Amino acid sequence: MRDCKIVSRNFELPNSHTLAVCKAHGGYKTLEKLGEYSPLQIIDIIKKSNLRGKGGGGAPAGEKWELMPQNSNKPSFLAVNCDESEPGTFKDRQIITKDPHLLLEGILITCYAIKAKHAYIYIRGEYKQFQDILQGAIDEAYADGLLSECDITIHRGAGAYICGEKSALLESMEGKRGHPRLKPKNKEPEWFFDNPTLVNNVETIASVPFIVQNGADAYRAYGTQKSPGTLLFAMSGHVEKPGVYEAEFGTSMMEYINHFGGGVKGGKKLKALIPGGVSCGVLTAKECENLTLDYEALSSVRSSLGTGGMILMDEDTDMVIALKNILEFYHEESCGQCTPCREGTGWSDKLVGKILDKRGTKEDIDKLLEIADTMNGKTICVFAPAASTVIVSFIKKFRAEFEAKL
Amino acid sequence: MSEMIDIIVDSQTYKVENGSLLIDLLIREKIKVPYFCYHESLGADGNCRMCMVEIEGQKRPQIACDTLVKPGMEIRSTGANIEKVRTNILELELINHPVDCPICDQAGECSLQDFYMDYGLHNTKVTIAQKVKHNKHIDLGSNVMLDQERCVLCARCTRFTDQITHTHELGIIGRGDEARVSTMPGRKLDNPYAMNVVDLCPVGALTSKDFRFTQRVWFLKTANSVCHGCAKGCNIYIDHNIMKYKDDVIYRFRPRRNDAVNGFFMCDEGRLSYKELQENRLISPLLNGEEIDEKEAIVKAKNLIEKCKNEITIIIDANLYTEEIEAILAFAKELGARVCSPKEIYMDESFQDDLLRCANRAANAQTIERLGIDTNEPNPSNLIINFNHPQDFKATSLISFLTHNRPCSGLSLPIAAYSENEGTLTNIDGITQKCEKAVYKNKPIPTILEYLQKVRA
């Protein structure tokens, strides 16, 4: 397996979060190159690199950047999404604690390209101790004069998962309830107090310095044709060495697990795996056998790559309890705006609880599938469809375990 | 104005403005579509997900309130697919609803109840004990009571205080099935238009403290009228009913949509002004405070008028119907009387705001102006005939036609209030509007027109 460290190259250095260490290892070097390119040329490089958003959706980042107006009488903004709350996902916090200056460098380049003078980092409320490290880096950068033309402000969330959805994130930044907005009819940027705004994930922005420094082709040398580059894949659950390990797209899933994670914990057999945070459909061990880690391979098995945070479940896992655990999360985190999600997440959680209590009936399983159907594609954001995918994949793939508890 | 285009809904072609909201067309053409959160005055919020329709070429059903019409669009609003989607979403809506219709004041005018009859009829799958519990009676202030369990979280009320009154008292707190409407901590719902949230609420979550538990709505009869609270002339419904062995009673005013005048709303003071119509009414003629017979009173009035001819001043209330004012003017001409309608007493700058309320508190002031009636105080006179003007006047003799009891010397005759009579008013913007007769008293009080006939005879 090829070693490829683009975002995590400084993670192992002692005091990697300080400006001195960062600069000693080539940090902020890209800024010197910025004079060679116009903002549009930077966007072009990003487009050519086919950098895909690393927050879970995998949409091409360059296309989003292109939507930002270059000549607007309104100020443009960058909002960096660090509301990392997906269970199984803990990659962004590695960046902000181990190499925060890489993120700041990426922000400066991005702001140059979209002509923004102010960037916000929207950070999850629970990440207070990581936020302090990031703020320390920002303070160092200010003292060093790096932020003379572009301000960076951390905006702390209040602990709602839904604020990781880009429009809810902006609502929250505007001081309102974190409710996703209705989708625009045409392609347009996001809006922060009615000003054009780009929202990108931490890792996406942290990938930008490498691409601008080394060119689009150097980035495309990693990964697959459609999913170029690398991702901070992560493992948790029943694995020997859980953690975040960067790998290129297209890596074999089982090879990755064995190479970095040391295999399933206690030498047991793998039973199931959730590929990229709980919002992705569960996979059986058989489905994982020949799977590669890229967007296309995962969608071919009706799941998705998500954030690349894999959750492993060994042969002793009770899938009903696992589903109950996930549904409790959705029940707790639904913002309550759309009816199907507000009521569907709660009811499905209660129904699985009923099955666990051995009071369930066959009708309850059918009802769960019906609720999942009502939640799928009928709400403003993709929260309910994600919950729906989880319910359907668990029941379809492990129905016998559910029926055994009736 | 955008171009008009053709779109097809359920195999029928409709002309509609390009880029307008699909749900507006469905509502206008009375095509059945269930919805809670959409409201023409508040726009789309897209949270109830009930107004699903099928659009040709789109894989999934879409909500009509967030769909802009395009040329050649083909919509299906009926059919097994779409009915199933609506039924399933409605079932979720009801899963934590207390279904307490028998004791709910909204029953009979509740969207949830209506849609349940159309799309629901589900079997009960959860017991009351399993439902999420919330507070069932919160006094929000301004006569508005909140039952959080009945709420469907359509956010119409919160959007009203955000977008219309800009007072921001209401918000939604909590997440998921714990989400509920509430005031901001330590604050009450407190603005002059607060009670409109009761009309906006599609279900029984927000009810009027003033109206609730007084009548089942299906017993109420409704007449179209115009509020007499100020010169704005907000269009209203007068909801009234005659209970067994009782007289005809008004139970509430509700705003009636008129985009040229008041839109969908009215102020709380106007809404509650119905009470004045049935309190402290003058019901029989008085002479210096003593009750007298109506025939006797008319004879006395006739004699007084005959005695004081050419020395009479007639005073007109600027709240009377145009027909009445014109008839009084004709009568005054016959008598050679001076006519005036002192304006000062109607003016109240503190009442004015930039939404609906205006400083002139007389409903027909525009007509007084149009007819050139003097709006100054009257000169001292031998005989003053006062047609319900709120001011007290001094004269050698006084005849007062009054709706309400008030200490008055001379002769007082009871007249019908505007709800017991029909006529027209012209509002401050020059819009002339008709008021229907709503209340039929068991013992009718004569109108001004009837009195004028009797006095002439």
Image (cartoon, rainbow, N blue to C red):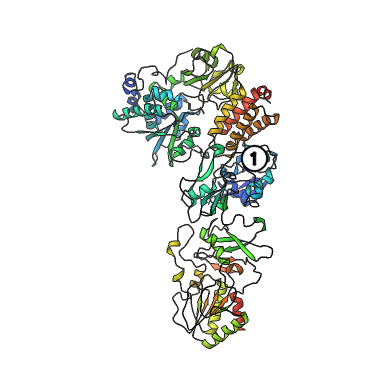
Quick check: B159 left or right of A349?
Answer: left
Q: Is residue A369 above or below residue A317?
A: below
- The amino acid sitting under disc 1 is Ile
Q: Is residue B91 above or below residue A135?
A: below
Residue B285 occupies quadrant: bottom right
State the quadrant of the C terminus of chain A: top right
Residue to which mark 1 is pinned: B128
Looking at the picture, tell me which residue is in the foreground, A132 or A288.
A132
Q: Position of residue A372 (x, y in %)?
A: 62, 32
Residue A130 occupies quadrant: top left
Q: In what element is the residue under mark 1?
A: helix
- Residue at the (44%, 65%) spot, across then down: B348
Q: Is residue B29 above or below residue B383?
A: above
Quick check: B286 left or right of A219?
Answer: right
Q: Position of residue B110 (x, y in %)?
A: 63, 50
Q: Residues within 10 Å of mark 1 (few under 14, many from 20)?
A: some
Q: Position of residue B314 (x, y in %)?
A: 51, 79
